[in-house]
């Protein structure tokens, strides 16, 4: 038979009983926090801009001259114009994804022998927002942005497509490309709220 051990309730001293010391201690915490600055926001009336490394709605970076060297090698085999998605249809993102069926990636071969991406859909209803697809991309194409309002009244509205991903990628890079790649928006404020973090 399994013996169950119960914790004994600590006994109050006479002083604690007479002067309600525990009650006073509790009220001290309540009063202190009552006058502290509010750190919550009244969403949707108030909206915060998340840090750059926030894992929001996916996007595609476009061909804009800032590609990694791997892209220039693959460009020999791809038909990608300036301003179009950098995707080379390598399927690495889909391979890395724990829910690979959420992707629909298609490409066609052109008469000049080059490849062109014709479809890149993602059903975000199945997405875990883990970011593994982003890490796997060899040409820094698929990224996650600071957009977090992806709710929709129907399932179709949660499927994102090649064109809107490229537009989102352009918008994100225009606003935040040069920002430091950090997790927090404001290090000083973070330290004030949660104390100093020692990175190992
Ligand atoms: S964030 Fe994770 S679950 Fe979502 S598409 Fe990328 S790899 Fe798949
Ligand atoms: S890993 Fe990158 S280049 Fe390859 S299919 Fe996915 S988005 Fe396109």
Image: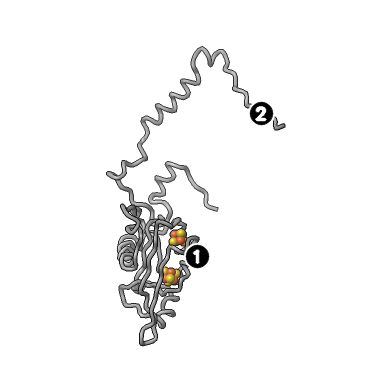
Vertical side of 73 occupied by 149: above or below: above
Q: Which residue is mark 1?
A: 96
Left or right for 7, reference 134: right
Q: Which residue is mark 2?
A: 5
Q: Quadrant of residue 181?
A: bottom left
Residue drawn where x is 62% and y is 23% of the image: 8
- Seen as rendered, the residue at the extreme left is 45
Identify the mark at residue 37; answer none if there is no mark.
Answer: none
Residue drawn where x is 31% and y is 60% of the image: 175
Q: Nearer the viewer, residue 9 or 121?
A: 121
Q: CB at mark 2 closer than 8 A to ligand 1?
A: no
Residue drawn where x is 38% and y is 56% of the image: 56
Mark yes or no: residue 99 visible: yes
Q: Residues within 10 Å of mark 2 (few under 14, many from 20)?
A: few
- Seen as rendered, the residue at the extreme bottom is 112
Q: CB at mark 1 closer than 8 A to ligand 1?
A: yes
Ligand 1 picture quarter? bottom left
Vertical side of 15 occupied by 180: above or below: below
Mark yes or no: residue 140 visible: no
Residue 171 locus on image (x, y percent):
30, 63
Alpha-carbon span between mark 1 and mark 2: 47 Å
Residue 55 locus on image (x, y percent):
41, 56
Q: Residues within 10 Å of mark 1 (few under 14, many from 20)?
A: some
């Amino acid at each position: 038979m399994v013996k169950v051990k119960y914790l004994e309730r600590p006994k109050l001293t006479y002083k604690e009983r007479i002067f309600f010391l525990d009650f006073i201690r509790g009220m001290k915490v309540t009063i202190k926090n009552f006058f502290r600055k509010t750190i919550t926001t009244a969403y949707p009336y108030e909206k915060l801009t998340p840090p750059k490394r926030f894992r929001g709605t996916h996007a595609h970076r476009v061909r804009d001259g800032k590609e990694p060297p791997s892209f220039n090698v693959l460009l020999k085999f791809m038909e990608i114009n300036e301003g179009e998605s950098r995707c080379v249809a390598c399927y690495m993102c889909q391979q890395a994804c724990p829910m690979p069926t959420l992707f629909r990636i298609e490409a066609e071969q052109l008469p000049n022998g080059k490849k062109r991406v014709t479809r890149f859909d993602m059903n975000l209803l199945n997405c875990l927002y883990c970011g593994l697809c982003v890490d796997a991309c060899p040409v820094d194409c698929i990224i996650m942005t600071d957009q977090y309002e992806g709710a929709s009244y129907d399932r179709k509205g949660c499927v994102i497509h090649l064109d809107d991903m490229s537009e989102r990628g352009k918008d994100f890079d225009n606003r935040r490309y040069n920002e430091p790649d950090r997790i927090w928006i404001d290090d000083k404020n973070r330290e004030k709220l949660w104390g100093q973090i020692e990175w190992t």
